Image (tube, rainbow, N blue to C red):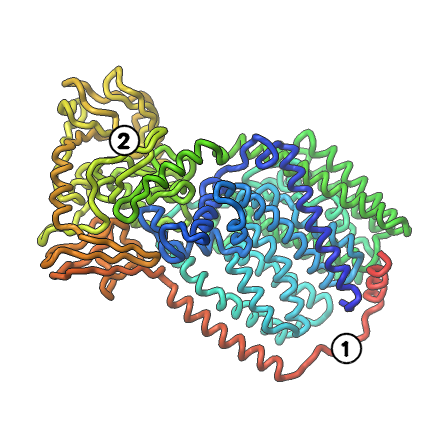
Amino acid sequence: MPAQTRPAVGRAAALAAFLTALAVCAGNAVARTFPFGPERRGVNDLANQFVPYHAHLWDLLHGRGDGGLLLNWQSGWGTSFLPDLGTYLGSPFALLVALFPREDIEYAVHAVTVLKTAAAAAAMTVALLRLRPGPWWAAAVLGASYGLCGWSVIEATYNPMWLDGLIAFPLLCLVGEWVRRGRRPLVGPLVVALCWVGNFYTAYMATIGAALVLLVRLAAARELRVRVVVRAVVTVLLGIGLAAPVLVPVFLGSTHAYPGWTNEFQPAGWADFLARLLPATYDFSTPAAFLGTGTLLLAGALLFHREVPRRERWLWAGFAVAVALSLQWAPTHLVWHVFATPNGSPYRQTFVLSGVLVLAAWTGLSYGWPGRRALLGGVGVVAAAGVGAVASELVTGWSYPLFALGLAAAAGALWLAARGGPPVVAAVLLAGALVGQAAATTAYADRARLGRLDDYPAWGAEQDRRTEALTEADGWPAYRTDSGREQITGNEPLLFGGQGAAYYSSHTPSVLTTTLASLGGGWTSRGRNLQSLDNPVTDALFAVGARWRGDALVRTGPVLPLVTVRPEGAAEPRYGASPFRNQEMLLGASVYTLPGKGAACPVGSEVFLWAPDFRGTARLGAGGAPVRMSGEMPKRRAAMTSLGVQGTAGTEVVLTGDRGRDHEVGCLDRQRLTAAVEGLRAKAATSIDVTGGGIRAELPPGTKGTVVVAAPRIAGWTCEGRPADAYGGLVALRADGRTSVSCDFRPPGLRAGLGLGACAAVLLCGWARWRGGRGRRPSAQPPARAEVRAEALARTG
């Protein structure tokens, strides 16, 4: 692009970002959704993962978090953090949360989400103007339509990590253009690396889309050459290599994770597919393809635009149709999703289709405003899509009125522009139609999500009180403080503080899930969302000295330190079907009586119920306090729970509801538990030092037996220079008379990732030097007639 058009690029990007932020915030305000009203914004993964993870990042950046970049001591009794960092917090935008107060973390995440959406619009606008010149304000509107696509304001808004893929697609298209022209051999791989670190999952999809865009552009210009393809492949591989220090641990973290569930892909009906192009529709299992009627009109007009070379018209039109069809065909669906149907929304690649349609619309517009023939053709294509959606139940009462008004406004704007009318009028019509439709779609989705997804309360006075209580009681590492069994989100330790068992991630380790389940723990999300286990035995074993229970903080009974020693000759626990017996094996003492079904616990013992598949109410006797249990295996597993102290002989457990497949009652003798704990404390570590990458402890002189660390033995632990042993799923090593022990944690793949990153950096420097040393520049070719007209249009538009 000529140098004199660079200010126009900046103006266009700024306008696109403004329109995008305006529409998103206006839609939130209309729906009265946080932060513009009382309606809750926190649904599903937004409240369960993204807000807590950003809160933990805030703590780390301000030196307040327990752990570091490698090890997270707050979740799951000690888990690997680098895979979670690379998955949920890899975006540079995440660092902005540090600028907000800790109690305003939800405001911070909302601001980051809006900024990402606006950045995606600005990036697409710049990409459009760099790929082909044209009217800067029209590029801004098209860029904003990309940032405001249905996938963005409906799906990614509560999965903010996906928005990094929305930004990545236009950036990678720019990289493709540099590759095509043989420019920026050093910057290109750096941009690829940034995109893949931001969010590898959507960056993978964006890379596929950008590669296809490059091939289409090369074919349209008859420049398809092997050397260009080789440059592209090398650029992408070097960029991915630079990102390897994050990508390899993320990948291996997924391989060690507890398996989720598998789905069979079912393509959406075509009426529903077309309906999602309309404004104000919502559905979880169809592609959120809304893009704004003006963009659809320009994309539909491309085939009828005679100023566009025939080859280019058919290539772009065919490309857009092929991408749309690829969303519906199972083999290509798997390719888009890294060969695994995702849990949840099966159309996560929809943003690429939106980007392709925007590029197709811009390609036609860059050759000149569509004439009457092209305009009528585009209206016909868009109207046909609207008619095809009539049979869909997803269409709402607002969909067609907004669709019709947007089509009329866009057609009027293009008609005026083609006849030399005032650009400001055309710009207002196009931008106004887009902002109105996008705001309405955002508002409708905000309301619809609350009725269809799990929602969680916003931060308020109660959360402040809970956080303050947990902070005041914190005694880490002498003991853990647990945020409680009755959870608001799946990652409460990260949000409220403490060091509990609760943890929710796509990287939840299999060993953590199976160990916690063996001890009576509960879960949701088929084992990926682990719940705190409120039980005196596990509290003692895992050094939980204080926990939130009900609406207050309580001190638990006597607990063990983080590092204990099991006697020499003690057999490693081999867990069986009974969590009560499993707890006793890990403790090394008998503390439960199991009365069997139809029998009652001894008077004075605490009654615990284990019924993982039970859904209903449990109580101790007819007059006991009811306890709600929500088992529904395998999706939900009810945790072992206390029903109170046995006060009267013969009182049995009463279950009301779906009994499920099995249940067991255990009667805890607190005196025996106290004796067992005191016996282990006598030979436990005398001092403990915990860091962000491991744990060190001093032992009594002459210690023999097995040293056990109260942390799950996830992959990556080494003790005294060798892989750690396991004792009942926990980190362990032989004492052998040591007076001190040291265990360190390194996420699997970190060393290999650093090595690959270093190699990629060396190769990149060599590649850039070789490219620069050749001294080759693209040959100066006279611009084609159509490009001259487009540049003239850009200067006068």
Quarter in which the C terminus is drawn: bottom right
Residue placed most toward the observer, 142 or 597: 142
In this view, the mark in front (1 or 2): 2
Residue linked to disc 1: 780
Q: Residues within 10 Å of mark 2 (few under 14, many from 20)?
A: many
Question: Judging from the image, what secondary structure is the residue with disc 2 in?
Answer: strand
| Label placed on residue 55 | none
Q: What is the x, y in percent for residue 499?
A: 33, 45
Task: Tell me which amino acid carries mark 2.
Answer: Thr
Residue furthest toward the top? 623
Quarter residue 407 falls in: top right
Task: Tell me which amino acid carries mark 1.
Answer: Ala
Sequence-wise, the earlier of marks 1 and 2 is 2
Which residue is at a point 72% across and 34% down the rendered structure image? 400
C-alpha span from label 1 to label 2: 76 Å
Q: What is the x, y in percent for residue 514?
A: 29, 45
Residue 689, placed above or below residue 386 = below
Q: Is residue 373 left or right of residue 747?
A: right
Quarter in which the N terminus is drawn: bottom right
Question: Judging from the image, what secondary structure is the residue with disc 1 in?
Answer: loop
Residue placed most toward the observer, 275 or 391: 275
Which residue is at a point 73% across and 51% down the rendered structure image? 15
Residue linked to disc 2: 641
